[in-house]
Amino acid sequence: MQELTANDLTLSYGEDIIIDNLNITVPKGEITVLIGANGCGKSTLLRSMARLLKPKTGHVVLDGHDIAKIQTKEVAKRLSILPQSPVTPEGLTVYELVKQGRNPYRGFLKQWSTDDENAVNHALELTHVTNLKDRSVDSLSGGQRQRAWIAMTLAQQTDLILLDEPTTYLDMTHQIEVLDLLFELNEKEGRTVVMVLHDINLACRYAHHIISIKDKKVFQQGKPEEIITCNLVEEVFQMKCDIYFDPNYGTPMCIPHGKGRSVFAEQQSELFKLN
């Protein structure tokens, strides 16, 4: 199983420093979620960890080796990344999309093999899109499309999967569908998953490990039940809240303060009458 770390990592776009001297280690075989305010550098950090952005200083280390010095195809055999809102070429079927995940294993003269076919079929099965394999990706719902893209990353057969906001633009049902799928991949396949999420409650429900980013550095990291507090939410998101435990899952649940009518306060007497 691959190990991924960032050592003294500084990332920038031109002279604009986005991440400054950051150190993290991604726990093997767990789900890690990056959280933080918009523009704090979560996606930039994820891109750098996949070798899509060259560090200004420091190193991303994959299984003990500087990722910048590993050949591109070798990186793609160890680590897969699903960017935010990927674009599918018009008319491409689900099967054709998932086949792209086998590109790291194919050379100019290498023919499509039984191993390739098995990997694609297994990825389709894991993501429950086998029945959609002949459909155009453009014709799918948001949740189906996201599962198809995840199937492509699974066809790479990597131990590490990185996802940038995999639930963006999805409704509640499809968000849970995608996150449940990633949870199952971690539980049943032992894949290490690293993803950026905006919903702190879903992050707490699905993550074993949370890394919060603020002021270009790690603010806090650890198990959700250990680090998600009112103070963290106020410091990282500049928002006051209350933290309760989710009655169904036992994970931290953030209730933000803000304007809005209190149904309970307005109807308190009626509620008591009903009970």
Image: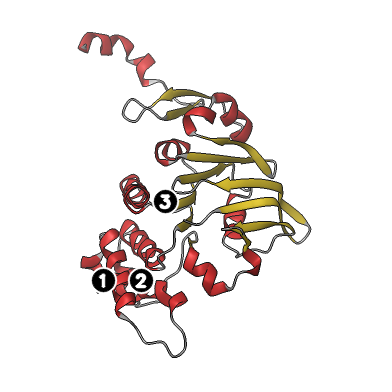
The residue at 31%/60% (across/down) is: 144
Mark 1 in CB contact with mark 3 (< 8 angstroms): no
The residue at 64%/41% (across/down) is: 218
* Label 3 neighbour load within 10 Å: few <14, some 14-19, many 20+: many
Instruction: Give amino acid for label 3.
Output: Thr
Element type where label 3 sits in the image: loop
Measure the C-alpha gap from mark 2 to mark 3. 19 Å
**123 or 7: nearer the eye?**
7
Measure the C-alpha gap from mark 1 to mark 3. 22 Å
The residue at 62%/61% (across/down) is: 65
Whichever of callouts 1 and 3 sits on the residue coming sooner in the sequence is: 1
- Pinpoint residue 18: horizontal percent, then vertical percent: 70, 51
Instruction: Give amino acid for label 2.
Output: Val
Mark 2 in CB contact with mark 1 (< 8 angstroms): yes
Residue, disc 1 = 133
- Pinpoint residue 107: horizontal percent, then vertical percent: 46, 84
Instruction: Give amino acid for label 1.
Output: Lys
Q: Which marked residue is nearer to the observer: mark 1 or mark 3?
A: 1
The scheme the figure's colours follow is: secondary structure
The residue at 42%/51% (across/down) is: 167
Task: Judge whether residue 136 can be spotted in this image.
Answer: no
* Left or right of 196 in this view: 68: right
Measure the C-alpha gap from mark 2 to mark 1. 9 Å
Residue, disc 2 = 98
* Label 1 neighbour load within 10 Å: few <14, some 14-19, many 20+: some
Location of the C terminus by quadrant is: top left
Mark 2 in CB contact with mark 3 (< 8 angstroms): no
Residue, disc 3 = 167
